[in-house]
Image: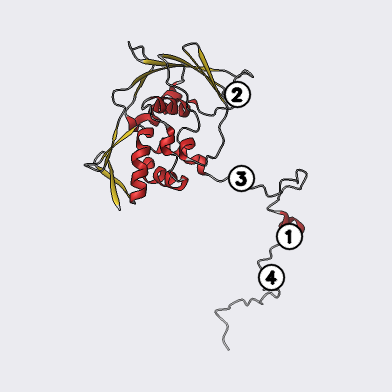
Amino acid sequence: MYRVFFNRKELCRLTIDELQALKLIAIFWGLDWDDSSNELTSRLTNLHVRIIGLSPKEFKRLSQLLAHSEANVTPKFQQGIKTLSTFRDTSDSNPFIKLEGNHSVYHFPKPKDHFSTPKDWVYKQLVPETLHTDTKVYWNPEKCDDISEWLTYLILGDSHGESLELLGDIPTGTYETLLRKVLTPINPALSSYQLKTSWPEKPNFNGPDSKDAEPIDPFKYNKDHKPTKFDPFKNQSKKKETKVINPFFRK
């Protein structure tokens, strides 16, 4: 087993196959791998991105999701850095997220709840071309629960220029193991979003062709049986006779 460190603290121990997968995945999480120290380090210390249009709560969440990478996000203007301007858009033409930049428009439909390969899972299929200096992000709050998650993927995906095909041969089980063993202790906020996709789908108890089936009632058994009153004196049907003690009585 191989030890893995972050900020000089041991995170976990991995098999050789898991370690090789981590070396490929790390860059997509905004991390670098150092072979000499078996340590992960933040790789986006010099990255600065201006974010416009978020609420204080959304901006705080975005900062938390990127904290492990040390990417610098700010609402303030800075010369020469990329700007992501966000707008709420509930129009029919925006099914989920729409990006505009340099006279180009990209539409992204709402992704699936479950992904079969890490190359789809890591950014949940939100993989645009390189972001432009000024990019407008239109998001549909009726279908997009949390814009901060998707801005995180946009920023991480734009920071390395590597193809997701590098992750094509990594088993899904290995990716989930690395999420739990490596990313969770480093950034539990980001890993919680990623691990949601690994939850199983809700079972359909009624079957696919039983739309009119009676919904399951966990209390049905109790309803079919008439309740009986609880009698705490059931085993004491005959009351015992009580005697009055007379201290002056003599045999």
- Residue 4 vs 163, above or below: the answer is below
Report the mark closest to the observer, 1 or 3: 3
The quadrant in which residue 156 appears is: top left
Quick one: label 2 or label 3, which is nearer the N terminus? 2
Task: Please state which of residues 121 and 60 is positioned toward the viewer in this rendering.
Answer: 121
- Residue 52 vs 14, above or below: the answer is above
- Residue 134 vs 206, above or below: the answer is above
The residue labelled by disc 4 is 234
Quick one: label 3 or label 4, which is nearer the N terminus? 3
Instruction: Identify the disc placed on residue 227.
Output: 1
The quadrant in which residue 223 appears is: bottom right
Residue at position x 45%, y 46% in the image: 171
**Seen in the image, is 19 located left or right of residue 119?**
left
- The image quadrant where one finds the C terminus is bottom right
Instruction: Identify the disc placed on residue 202.
Output: 3
Spatial distance from mark 2 to mark 1, Cα to Cα? 52 Å
Q: Amino acid at mark 4?
A: Lys
The quadrant in which residue 59 appears is: top left
Q: Secondary structure at mark 3?
A: loop
The residue labelled by disc 2 is 95
Report the mark closest to the observer, 2 or 1: 2
Spatial distance from mark 2 to mark 3, Cα to Cα? 24 Å
Residue at position x 60%, y 24% in the image: 95
Q: Amino acid at mark 1?
A: Pro
Residue at position x 36%, y 38% in the image: 24
Q: Neighbour class for label 2 at 10 Å: few (<14), some, many (≥20)?
A: some
Q: Secondary structure at mark 1?
A: loop
Report the mark closest to the observer, 3 or 4: 3
Q: Residue 60 appears at what percent x and percent y?
A: 41, 26
**Seen in the image, is 202 located left or right of residue 59?**
right
Q: Amino acid at mark 2?
A: Pro
